[in-house]
Image (cartoon, rainbow, N blue to C red):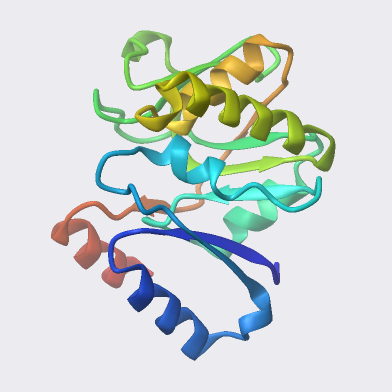
Amino acid sequence: LRRFTVVDGFHGDDLRAHLLTHFPAEWFRFARNEEYETTNNAYSLALARPPASESILVADADLVFEPEVITRLLGAPHANCLVLRSRGELGEEEMKVKLDADHRVIDLSKEIPLADAAGESVGLVRFSAADTARLFDALDAAVSEGIGRTCYYEAVFVRWIRAGGVLHAVDLGDLRALEVDTVEDLERARREF
């Protein structure tokens, strides 16, 4: 991977300066979410629309993971894949995933009952070039309707799925991925990675 679209907001200039100090500038395309205080990640993802239809990898910025996670995701045989953690504790706050019998995602929500959840979406998703334009059309429609300004991007993924999109789950298995939301999470990430 050598091309990254980074959507920033809070301290965006600091983030850009740090990235450009450590990595080649040609790797990056930046977009600024000027409304980061009042919008959610669906709106930010809509700002990341690629200039041409191409395969994309969506990665939450607060995620730390083993490099093999990307290898597993990119090596999966399906066109569109979401990384799923099926092992370990699953709480009410996690973005839960409901699958059909063929491991296709049929729902993504924090509201899915624990008994119906196959696991947690860790915040890594791959979309094929063929489906990227349709996904961003769904994001743009959601933003135009208003819902896309305040919802999680997973809600738009579900709309895309219900309109015919197919998203398969790729299980982490024993691989590690950690969302960093708290100081304790950061300390854990520093110990483990």
Image-based side of 103 in relation to 176, left or right = right
Residue 173, visible in the rendered structure: no
Q: Residue 168: give x, y in percent of width and height.
A: 67, 27
The residue located at (66%, 75%) in the rendering is 27
Location of residue 78 by image quarter: top right
- 22 in relation to 93, above or below: below
The residue located at (60%, 35%) in the rendering is 82
Image-based side of 41 in relation to 127, left or right = left
- 102 in relation to 49, above or below: above
Farthest residue in the bottom direction? 21
- 91 in relation to 16, above or below: above
Q: Residue 14: give x, y in percent of width and height.
A: 34, 77
The one of 192 and 60 positioned closer to us in this rendering: 60
The one of 116 and 139 positioned closer to us in this rendering: 139
The residue located at (42%, 16%) in the rendering is 117
Q: Residue 111: give x, y in percent of width and height.
A: 32, 14
Image-based side of 169 in relation to 59, left or right = right
Classify the position of the N terminus by image quarter: bottom right
